[in-house]
Amino acid sequence: MSTPATATIEGTGTKPADVVVRGNASGFLQEIISGAHQLRADEPVSAGGGDAAPGPYDYLLVGLGACTSMTVGLYARSKKWPLENISVSLRHSRIHARDCAECETKNGMLDRIDVEIGLSGALTAEQRAKLLEIAGKCPVHRTLKSEINIRLRTAPSGSLRQIGESKIQ
């Protein structure tokens, strides 16, 4: 992997992106640069990838799970509750809208994320219930539940050279 996204993008006057994802057209394997951190993403073999790294939906779940765990832990610490450990298990699936009683949409398909939160420690039933409520208030959860405006544009000519081309073969 090459230059971190925090490096200057020479001659553009443009601030680097928070996350940069690079790959080539020969496959699904991608380099991900997030500040000083370097990761990879791929698709499973069944989808035509090499299964060399987590896939895009895995990273979506990672973000939600990490945020949920951090938010629950922060709240418990602020209350000085006896929470010892947190585990968050997540699964993404597609479901028929008609099979979802609590959903507003009634036609077509919907994305569903099932989240199971494990809490260890000498917590009361009330504390556990409050922590489950707080889990639904993590910033990523709120983002995913809100209207999201994603703006796409083409990068300026030559910007791939300036931030470095993918090293993936």
Image (cartoon, helix red, strand yellow):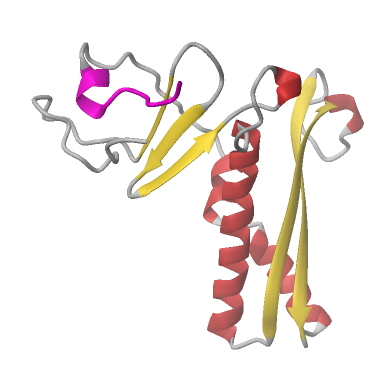
Q: Residue 168, position in %: x, y?
A: 44, 25
Identify which residue, 72 or 165, lies in the foreground.
165
Identify which residue, 110 or 120, lies in the foreground.
120
Q: Is residue 2 above or below residue 116?
A: above
Q: Would you identify the image quadrant in which residue 123 lies? A: bottom right
Residue under the image location 78 percent in, 88 percent down: 122
Q: Is residue 167 above or below residue 71?
A: above
Q: Would you identify the image quadrant in which residue 21 lies? A: top left
> Considering the image in quadrants, where does the C terminus appear?
top left
Residue under the image location 44 percent in, 16 percent down: 24
Q: Residue 120, position in %: x, y?
A: 76, 78
Q: Which residues are magenta?
A: 159-169
Residue under the image location 83 percent in, 80 percent down: 125
Identify which residue, 64 or 4, lies in the foreground.
4
Q: Residue 129: say if magenta.
A: no
Q: Is residue 131 above or below residue 51?
A: below
Q: Is residue 110 above or below residue 120?
A: above
Farthest left residue in view:
11
Q: From the viewer's perspective, is 1 left or right of 8?
A: right
Residue under the image location 79 percent in, 22 percent down: 109
* Figure label count: 0
Q: Residue 162: say if magenta.
A: yes
Q: From the viewer's perspective, is 139 left or right of 153?
A: right
Farthest front residue in view:
169
Q: Would you identify the image quadrant in which residue 96 lies? A: top right
> Considering the image in quadrants, where does the N terminus appear?
top left
Q: Residue 26, position in %: x, y?
A: 51, 12
